[in-house]
Image (spheres, helix red, strand yellow):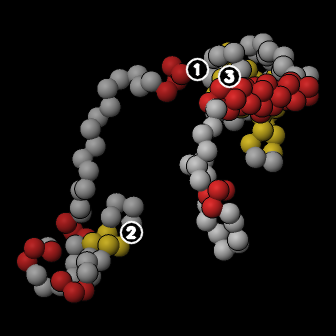
Amino acid sequence: MSRRTKSILPITRKALKPQLVNDKNVQRKMTVSKQNQKLNHDRTARNLTSLNVGQSVRVRFGKTWKKGKVIQKVDDRSYRIQLTDGSIFRRNRSVLHATRESNDIEEFDVQVLLPQHSPVPVPQNVINTESVNNEGYTTRAGRLVRGNRKYTGCEWTK
């Protein structure tokens, strides 16, 4: 892999012969390159301040910003946010902007969603036999369901 590839341009045979590459020099150059990249990045990079639980924030969704509240700090840069509509998201600190807006978002209680008693099983795929006719049948919602014309008259379609 350390030789030049053939092309239509005139080239000497010596240039086509492989040459050994010093691994130490390659590793040293790669290390220096990575250090330079880190140095250039760290010149303009800044650490974002951490947010407190209950703090009012704006959350970026594409080009729009929605109002929310921090309800939990999940990780070093990750927060659980509750929006004004009650939805909860986990977002990175980079898409959160701390604001001084009034915090009028009520905490969402998960206990509200839990059933008070065991639900009664609802039979599924119940067809009203009175509404079955040649054209199809009507569902409980009032939708008329028609069978495929290709198979009309077959016993297994009834």
Q: Residue at x 64, y 69 (%)?
A: 7
Quadrant of res 96: top right
Q: Earlier in the sequence, mark 2 or mark 3?
A: 3
Considering every residue shown, the one lying at the far top of the view is 52
Q: Can residue 157 be seen in this view?
A: yes
Residue 78 disc label: 3
Kind of element beneath mark 1 = loop
Q: In this view, does 11 lie above or below 39?
A: below
| Count of residue discs | 3
Read off the residue under disc 2.
143
Q: Can residue 106 be seen in this view?
A: no
Q: Where is residue 91 in the image (x, y as percent from the top left)?
A: 68, 29
Q: Where is residue 24 in the image (x, y as percent from the top left)?
A: 65, 26
Quadrant of res 119: top left
Q: Earlier in the sequence, mark 1 or mark 3?
A: 3
As rendered, which of 154 and 140 lies closer to the eye? 154
Q: Earlier in the sequence, mark 2 or mark 1?
A: 1
**Side of 85 relative to 46 (left or right):** left
Q: Which amino acid does label 3 sit on?
A: Ser
As rendered, which of 141 and 104 lies closer to the eye? 104
Read off the residue under disc 1.
109
As rendered, which of 93 and 31 lies closer to the eye? 31
Q: What residue type is labelled 1?
A: Asp
Quadrant of res 90: top right
Kind of element beneath mark 3 = strand
Q: Which residue is drawn at 74% across and 30% down?
A: 29
